[in-house]
Amino acid sequence: MSAPEPVPAADPAPQRRCQNCGELLLGEHCYACGQPTKGLVRHFSSIIGDFMDSVFELDSRILRTLGPLLFKPGYLSEEYFAGRRVRYVSPVRLFVFLSIFAFFAAQLSFDIAADQPDAAETKAEAGADQARTRGLRTATTAAEVERIRDEALAEIKKARAESANVPGVAIGLDVAEKSIAAEAARRLREIEESERSGRPLAIAEDDEGKISFNGTPWDAKSNPLEISWFSDGMNRKLNERIGRAEGNIERIQKDPNLLKDAFLSTVPTTLFVVLPLFALLLKIAYVFKRRLYMEHLIVALHSHSFLCASLLLVLLLDALATWTAGAAWISRPLGWIEVALIAWMPIYLLLMQKRVYRQGWIMTTLKYSVLGYCYIVLLSLGAAAALMINLVSI
């Protein structure tokens, strides 16, 4: 009996080679030149899928990242330093998207005009104060100034008696009282000076919503702002911006939500600018730890991502509590969770700082307090700059 004929071996799979340099491919990227095997010349649906995956990372990494981010202080930073990075969303991408979503939700969560329970009454009181101030500025005799001043002070005295048990009101009344007294004294001096010199008394125009420099309303021609070390072109551009800001102030007085929306839309950018400065503060505070600046930046990115995620959750809980206000058994626990989450924020950051930098509680608490104060100053300056930018951009 003859031996069976050998079965011919199957043809080996064709070897793939890089279309750019011709080297043998061992994966989806060429090890020699780095070119990927996937280009744009393919089905559009697969391109959209790759885009969604690369931009939003809609896979299990989100679930592996959000849990530790919210409940395990410092864990993600330590994992990153240990080299376990691929399993989690990258720190930069995590911060960017959480900050954008959080402050977009903040824009939708409240409305300034709608949230004022006594908006009409407050507006009427503010209008009355402005009317009294304008009356003092346009009074032409000392007797008229004294009458307006005495009437205004009498109303403040009456309001003080009616709101004696309301906390915080006395401070505002004190400010109003001092403002009226100062304005009356200034106008009396102007009247006295006019009578003594024989010059006509200047009548102040209504400057509500106007920008003033050196006590005189700004005007692009008669009273422009000029900085000596600026060129003519720079001064001209500056005054154009001031004029635009003055117009925006009038718009904001009619609709304060314009400024609110514009400001909240720039907060993520402001935080992104403040982040490197906060990382520098961490570098200075822990200079003897001999950590690289980028390690401190990773810590700053993760801590800010946690704050943005917590803010987003607080806004969602607040919205749910509002929608379920009629069912106390639902809204009340939601309110408790919201308060607990707000209290968790500073505790989380302290525990994160303790875990990452591994110092004793006394030094950690001291540095935490100093860093917190410096950060608040930085954030206030950034917010002020954002407000100024928004005044000329909305």
Image: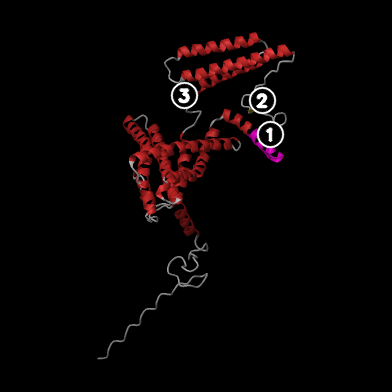
The quadrant of the rendering that contains the C terminus is top right
Q: Residue at x 45, y 15 (%)?
A: 163
Task: Kindly identify which residue carries mark 2.
Answer: 216
Residue 78 is situated, as x and y percent measured from the top left of the image, at: 37, 50
Q: Which residues are magenta?
A: 224-244
Q: Of helix, strand and loop, which mostly describes the magenta segment?
A: helix
Whole-angstrom CA distance, mark 3 to mark 1, is: 43 Å
The first of marks 3 and 1 along the sequence is 3
Assign a secondary structure to mark 1.
Answer: loop
The reply to whether dot 3 and dot 1 touch (C-beta < 8 Å) is no
Q: Residue at x 62, y 18 (%)?
A: 134
Task: Kindly identify which residue carries mark 1.
Answer: 226
Furthest-right residue in this view: 198
Task: Kindly identify which residue carries mark 3.
Answer: 117
Position of 70 with respect to 274 (left or right) is left
Q: Is residue 230 above or below residue 185?
A: below
Assign a secondary structure to mark 3.
Answer: loop
